[in-house]
Amino acid sequence: MERLVITGGRRLNGEISVNGAKNAAVAIIPAVILASGVCVIENLPYIEDVVSLVDTLTRLGCKCGFRDRHTLVADSSGVSETQAAFDSVRKLRASYYLVGALLGRFGEASVTLPGGCNFGTRPIDQHIKGFEALGAEVRIEHGQIIAKAAKLRGAPIYLDVASVGATINIMLAAVFAEGTTVIDNAAKEPHVVDCANFLNIMGARVKGAGTDVIKIQGVPGLHDCEYTIIPDQIECGTFMIAAAATGGRVTLKNIIPKHMDSISAKLSEMGCSVREGADFLTVEGAERLKPVTVKTMVYPGFPTDLQPQMTVLLCVAGGTSIVKETVFDNRFQYITELRRLGCDVTIDGRVAVVEGPAKLTGADVTATDLRAGAALIIGGLCADGATSIGNVKYIDRGYETIEHNLSSLGADIKRVRAEEPT
């Protein structure tokens, strides 16, 4: 067991490069199954979720190897197994993309129900609705999602909610389906577009990604390709918020500034300076942060994956701020840990009322999920004294050696074994 130990009170200053997007990577890696040759995927973040998915591909018969830490070479021509009931599958939420990819290529799939962070109900009913519309029979037995289809055929599919997972999964299943599939009320997140672009580079015919209507014209096969993952919107946002919280000045390189519009706008509203370049932006904190109202929404709204980090920032801002969570029903469970640091937050259903500025002090806390862990790190950076964060495994699922990046910006943070003194 490992912990992150932070001695707070230091402003973050400097520049770092943002890694490839976790949420794009965990969709594109399963999509490799659909190719008939070798795929080279660059700018992958070297994180636990990526390692688990690559392990799963290998067990299914895909020949995988890392050219370097961030470049995967995968030959899926030998994949013949359609059952994925491995420990690596149970570790992450994105394992459900294996259903769409295997169903699309082989007409059948049996995949262990997804795991990942537990912060509310995340049903897969829209995924199943899409598979069934394409002609598959789907059932859940003994903790397995089992899907079979004699032949997949394109169909109109209306999503009751703009689900990222369902949108991508239907795309994966539909690339070989006979005819045209139309996904109405599709999710528009950057990683949906990235996955569609990857499929198109391999020869798929996906149009409309990034809008609420996506059309997939079935093709007979997909070929090998080389592809580069987009920068991680959430990692970039996390460091933007950390810079603002510590009153520092940080430049984030290797990013797409347009993806950061909702975060940039909210930080500017709080009084921070946000300056954009072609592929970078610089955030400079304000001496006095203003309170704001934040409402999580699907893209291009404020992302739910940055809600915990933003809540910590509001704790050190002056006045009363409101945070409304509209995506997940239990994403505020990390608030108990924030209170240990001295945050003044009151929860009423899906609304958090934040009173600031709070005087944060170091404490022993535990990450309840990936983004909650990032929020606790930001809290520790702002707190007087030492903060020790447990359950680092959650943080490692989405951030590649986050302590190294923060150290390079001047933070006092280190990773220690549980038995070491903190």
Image (spheres, rainbow, N blue to C red):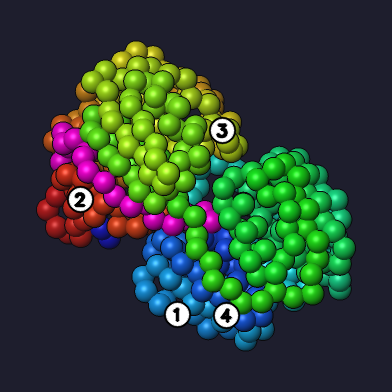
Instruction: Identify the residue under disc 3.
Output: 301
Are the residues flagged by discs 3 and 2 in contact, CB closer than 8 Å? Answer: no
> Label 3: few (<14), some or many (≥20) within 10 Å?
some
Are the residues flagged by discs 1 and 2 in contact, CB closer than 8 Å? Answer: no
Q: Residue furthest bottom?
A: 78
Q: Residue 342 at x, y = what percent? A: 26, 26
Q: Earlier in the sequence, mark 1 or mark 3?
A: 1
354 in magenta: no
Residue 280 sits in which quadrant?
Answer: top left
Q: Which is in the foreground here, disc 4 or disc 1? A: 4
Residue 251 sits in which quadrant?
Answer: top left
Estimate the spatial distance between the alpha carbons at disc 1 and disc 3, rounded to whole Å: 37 Å
Per the image, label 3 sits on a secondary structure element best described as loop
**Which disc, if any, is residue 38?**
4
**Which residue corresponds to the image point at 74% horizontal and 69% vertical from the top-left?**
104
**Is there any visible trace of residue 159 in the rendered image?**
no
Say what amino acid the circle numbered 3 marks.
Gly
Per the image, label 4 sits on a secondary structure element best described as strand
Q: Earlier in the sequence, mark 3 or mark 2?
A: 3
Instruction: Identify the residue under disc 1.
Output: 65
Q: Is residue 347 above or below residue 124?
A: above
Are the residues flagged by discs 4 and 3 in contact, CB closer than 8 Å? Answer: no
Estimate the spatial distance between the alpha carbons at disc 4 and disc 1, rounded to whole Å: 11 Å
User: Quick check: 169 left or right of 370?
Assistant: right
Q: Which residues are magenta?
A: 6-24
17 in magenta: yes
Q: Residue furthest top?
A: 319
**Which residue corresponds to the image point at 20% horizontal and 50% vertical from the top-left?**
408
Q: Is residue 247 above or below residue 121?
A: above
Q: Residue 382 at x, y = what percent? A: 22, 32
Q: Residue 189 at x, y = what percent? A: 59, 45
Q: Residue 359 at x, y = what percent? A: 22, 23
